[in-house]
């Protein structure tokens, strides 16, 4: 993605557009900017044989006789119109008149937090070309920051959209590029937001300790640069970490809401209000019906469809699980109202292009509405397909549980036990009809299997008869281009032959699987193998260590470790050792 702060040479702009398919132009009078956009679009369209579509943000409120739309509604109209064009066939789209504030805003809580973020979301996976013209309220000033800084903000917006869609895997590469762009531009504010989004991504992927560390760092950096809404978002994400253990922290969520309100961030306050309500929804006597209605009104005021969708989802879930003391009426009446709310949530998730929310709503709707489920014999396969599309194996495991029903021994399936804390799985309940009451917090993360978690076939094998590889990070939090020491040990169990004899002269071979160097290439664990890991960019880095017996040429064990590298040194910190991922072969 590329931004152009002022009008440049037409040929250079055309090359940028053809290479990256997106160009944002600002810092020029309306007539000059529009003429420039038209010239670029015409050249590209003529050579590629594509049609050109043109939209002006200012015109969106007058379409179909709907004058007087709010800026958010006008932006939504532009995004929806563009989405329809992109889906039909490749073309060249010119969107002019985008306010400068809407062009570089960071959507921290919703997929449609800014007009540019919405355009990026609509443009994803498209073969079309997009040109955006940004207005400038101040005469002679650049509508966008410098090229590197603006590029970083756009990358952050795209990463946030992926997280909102429930696809945090795609956010990692974007965040790494965003950090580089902000560092080059010397933009401390942008770098602080990047650290926040790293922490949010880690929370979504179930990496609680990494998320906690990064969110604490982000909160302090955002506070240091006076970014009060960002500080409130970091506090809210830290509070949501508690839900993973099955014990939410409503007080911390209430404090995050107050911080958003003091910062004048109505959208952030709405999200904090939602998660506070969800955290307390199952408490006896809590007025959840009134609170969900209030939250829905808040999201409507800021035109946040994704927030409204999650509000309807949790409202329906609470209603479907209610014990009849909510004043709605009989079971049939409650079920019909829950069905209506689930259907509304499903429609909004589809409009907001959020497969994560759509899959969870489809699953809960099917579980709470037997008639709906039985109308579709392939209901489980369809939901599993949506989870699979975003790589959410944990979501697929919940669908498997819903199909299989409770296990005879009462133990959770391996695919859930290896991903979620025991405390959360202990809150899993079952209806009299054998339907699971899935913990609310299960939909907050997409956790990966814990490294080294024993498979069912391993549980009967004594662990003390095997040897393990232990990795220890000896230095503080790794930062780009600074070596960090990693110690590798082979630790035999009490029943292993090596426990009573010296280790043989094994060889440990180290390999970096990303943009990093590791030196030396080989070490001898018996002599205390130590490696120097030098990353060249922030983000998550994977390392592979292969332990071999040089006498026989046999590979005894291969492990992989992930190490998080922060954008810059946040201060002294002693991290936990990187967790090895054992392969099928063991010493």
Image (cartoon, rainbow, N blue to C red):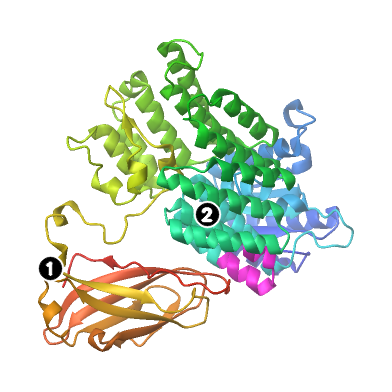
Q: Is residue 495 above or below residue 215?
A: below
Q: Mark number for residue 446?
A: none
The alpha-carbon separation of the residues under discs 2 and 1 comes to 40 Å
Residue carrying label 2: 200
Residue under the point 66% across and 38% down: 76
Image point 73% across, 67% down: which residue?
146
Query: In the visual, does 89 lie left or right of 397?
Result: right
Say if residue 9 shows up in the picture.
yes
Is 116 or 322 nearer to us in this picture? 322
Is 192 contained in the magenta span? yes
Disc 2 secondary structure class = helix
Residue 332 lies, in percent from the top left, at: 41, 12
Seen in the picture, residue 236 relative to 297 is either above or below; the reply is below
Q: Nearer the viewer, mark 2 or mark 1?
A: 1
Nearer to me, 5 or 336: 336
Q: Nearer the viewer, residue 143 or 217?
A: 217
Tell me the residue that label 1 is attached to.
Answer: 465
- In-image side of 353 versus 182 (left or right): left
- Magenta stretch in the rendered image: 177-195
Task: Say how many tags the image has.
Answer: 2
Q: In what quadrant of the picture does the N terminus appear?
A: bottom right
Q: Position of residue 305 (x, y in %)?
A: 60, 35
Relative vertical location of residue 259 with respect to residue 519 in this rendering, above or below: above
For the residue labelled by badge 1, is the local secondary structure a helix, a strand or a loop? helix
Q: Main secondary structure of the magenta part?
A: helix
User: Residue 430 occupies which quadrant of the picture?
Assistant: top left
Q: Residue shown at 12%/83% (left/top)?
A: 501
């Amino acid at each position: 993605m590329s931004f152009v702060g002022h009008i440049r040479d037409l040929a250079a702009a055309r090359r940028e557009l053809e290479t990256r398919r997106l160009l944002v132009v600002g810092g020029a009078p309306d007539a000059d900017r529009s003429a420039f956009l038209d010239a670029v679009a015409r050249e590209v369209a003529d050579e590629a044989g594509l049609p050109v579509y043109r939209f002006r943000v200012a015109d969106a409120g007058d379409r179909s006789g709907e004058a007087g739309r709010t800026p958010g509604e006008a932006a939504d109209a532009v995004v929806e119109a563009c989405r329809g064009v992109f889906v039909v066939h490749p073309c060249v789209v010119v969107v002019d008149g985008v306010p400068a504030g809407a062009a570089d805003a960071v959507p921290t809580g919703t997929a449609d937090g800014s007009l540019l973020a919405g355009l990026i979301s609509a443009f994803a996976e498209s073969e079309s070309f997009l040109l955006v013209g940004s207005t400038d309220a101040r005469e002679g000033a650049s509508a966008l920051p410098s090229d590197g800084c603006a590029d970083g903000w756009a990358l952050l917006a795209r990463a946030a959209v992926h997280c909102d869609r429930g696809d945090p895997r795609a956010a990692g590469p974007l965040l790494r590029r965003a950090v580089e762009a902000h560092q080059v531009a010397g933009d401390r504010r942008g770098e602080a937001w990047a650290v926040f989004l790293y922490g949010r991504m880690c929370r979504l992927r179930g990496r609680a300790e990494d998320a906690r560390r990064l969110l604490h760092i982000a909160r302090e950096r955002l506070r240091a640069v006076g970014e009060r809404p960002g500080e409130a978002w970091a506090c809210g994400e830290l509070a949501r970490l508690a839900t993973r253990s099955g014990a939410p922290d409503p007080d911390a969520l209430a404090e995050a809401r107050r911080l958003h309100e003091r910062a004048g961030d109505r959208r952030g306050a709405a999200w904090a209000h939602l998660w506070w309500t969800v955290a307390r929804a199952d408490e006896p006597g809590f007025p959840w019906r009134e609170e969900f209605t209030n939250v829905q009104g808040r999201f409507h005021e800021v035109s946040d469809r994704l927030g409204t969708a999650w509000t309807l989802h949790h409202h329906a879930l609470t209603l479907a699980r209610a014990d009849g003391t909510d004043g709605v009426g009989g079971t049939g009446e409650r079920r019909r109202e829950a069905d209506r709310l689930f259907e509304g949530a499903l429609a909004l998730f589809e409009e907001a292009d959020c497969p994560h929310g759509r899959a969870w709503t489809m699953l809960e709707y099917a579980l709470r509405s037997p008639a709906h489920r039985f109308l579709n014999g392939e209901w489980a396969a369809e939901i599993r397909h949506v989870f699979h599309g975003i790589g959410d194996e944990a979501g697929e495991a919940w669908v498997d549980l819903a199909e299989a029903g409770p296990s005879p021994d009462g133990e959770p399936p391996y695919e859930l036990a290896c991903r979620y804390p025991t405390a959360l799985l202990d809150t899993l309940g079952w209806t009299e009809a054998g339907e699971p009451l899935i913990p609310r917090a299960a939909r907050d993360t997409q956790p990966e299997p814990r490294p080294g978690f024993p498979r069912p076939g391993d549980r009967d094998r004594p662990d003390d008869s095997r040897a393990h590889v232990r990795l220890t990070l000896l230095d503080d939090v790794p930062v780009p281009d600074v070596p960090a020491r990693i110690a590798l040990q082979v630790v035999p169990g009490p029943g292993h032959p090596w426990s009573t004899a010296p280790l043989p002269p094994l060889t440990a071979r180290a390999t970096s699987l990303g943009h990093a160097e590791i030196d030396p290439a080989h070490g001898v664990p018996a002599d205390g193998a130590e490696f120097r890991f030098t990353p060249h960019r922030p983000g998550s880095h994977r390392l592979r260590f292969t332990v071999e017996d040089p006498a026989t040429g046999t590979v005894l064990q291969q492990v992989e470790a992930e190490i998080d590298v922060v954008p810059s040194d946040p201060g002294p910190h002693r991290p936990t050792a990187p967790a090895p991922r054992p392969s099928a072969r063991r010493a």
